[in-house]
Amino acid sequence: MGFNCGIVGLPNVGKSTLFNALTATAAAEAANYPFCTIEPNTGRVGVPDPRLFELAKIAQSQKIIPTQLEFVDIAGLVRGASKGEGLGNQFLGHIRSVDAIIHVLRCFENDDITHVDGSVDPLRDLTTIETELMLADMESLERRVQGLEKKAKGGDAESKALLGITQKVLKHLEEGKMANTFEVSKDEKPLFDQLQLLTSKPILYVCNVSEEEAATGNAHTAKVAAYAQQHGTGSVIISAAIEAEVSSLESEEEQLEFLQSLGLQETGLKQVIREGYKLLDLLTFFTIGPKEARAWTTYKGAKAPQAAGEIHTDFERGFICAETTSYEDYIACNGETGAKAAGKMRLEGRDYIAKDGDIFHFRFNV
């Protein structure tokens, strides 16, 4: 299963610089004009997890393979995108295909870098993009309602049920609220998911600041943090310029030294990756052995066979059971042998719900 976050924002907010640093490539051209990134660029990045290295040390694994997240750099949206302004329709289609949104906001002053609206105001920028997404969703739902009404009149029960939820969500959007704040019941969830709304996706706000303000933030980032908290989501502060500089340094020692000289303990990118992972409601499980220590991703609430399926479909199809040890027990017992001897390794069946940090050895038969 692939999990991906789309990086969005107005032109010239630092999206492509952030993407380049995230993927440590120059795959996305960062230039001081709108629409320099027309096709979405995609990059995969390892999710930082110190637990993996601790496990590998105990198992003396030859290789360490972190789990990964995919980031998609989507070209800058502008006001009117929902009506096709700029390259609106194309960009909205790219947003529709991602699982979550990383919304980059310009929170730095720089006269040399033009702002499409002439001044720096991240809350205004945030409203511009979210309004465009809401308008696109409303248009999509209005079209759906017309078709569903005809089918519902003809006695189609499924269309009648879908029409009910569609009308409720449309009213919610018309009140100026994002679909991700719509309270959906367990029964309505499958119908709601069918609507495939842009504003139903979880959002993380990334405040791009100058190098001098990376450690402290500023008045702009404080406003974004308050807004994020009010809307039940998160925000992080980064300096895309610092991230670009760090990604060009070869060794971890050089990177850490550079960051510490700026009063930072880690890159903003690590925060973005971690928060993106949380945003998607994911968890990490491990497979550990002498050949490799590997982290895998599945979603919270996944059962053992579904977790096994992240490794290979045959593992899910022929699932028998999962030899399971918690991370804490594996460390405390100094590995698999000690965990078995202490009775800390369990055999879990099909109904076991995977927990973050589980170490699995799947038994299967195809």
Image (cartoon, helix red, strand yellow):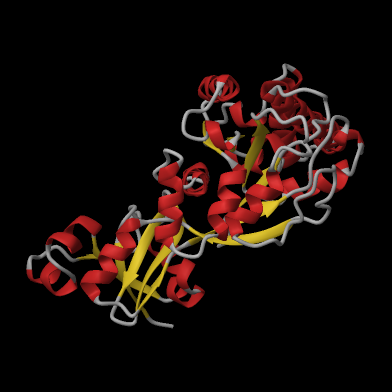
Return the residue found at the far top: 175
In front: 151, or 134?
A: 134
Q: Quadrant of residue 107?
A: top right
Count of labels in the image: 0
x then y, percent, for residue 277: 49, 48
x then y, percent, for residue 259: 45, 46
Q: Is residue 134 left or right of residue 351?
A: right
Q: Quadrant of residue 349?
A: bottom left
x then y, percent, for residue 278: 47, 44
Q: Residue at x 84, y 43 (%)?
A: 33
Q: Height in image: 56 above or below 3?
A: below
Q: Height in image: 208 above or below 100?
A: above
In front: 11, or 233?
A: 11
In front: 193, or 222?
A: 222
Instruction: Evaluate whether residue 348 shows in this view.
Output: no
Return the residue found at the far front: 261
Q: Residue at x 61, y 44 (%)?
A: 240
Name the image quarter holding the N terminus. bottom right
Return the residue found at the far left: 342
Q: Quadrant of residue 189?
A: top right
Name the image quarter holding the C terminus. bottom left
Q: Is residue 157 left or right of residue 308?
A: right
Q: Residue at x 52, y 28 (%)?
A: 217
x then y, percent, for residue 164: 71, 29
Q: Residue at x 53, y 24 (%)?
A: 225
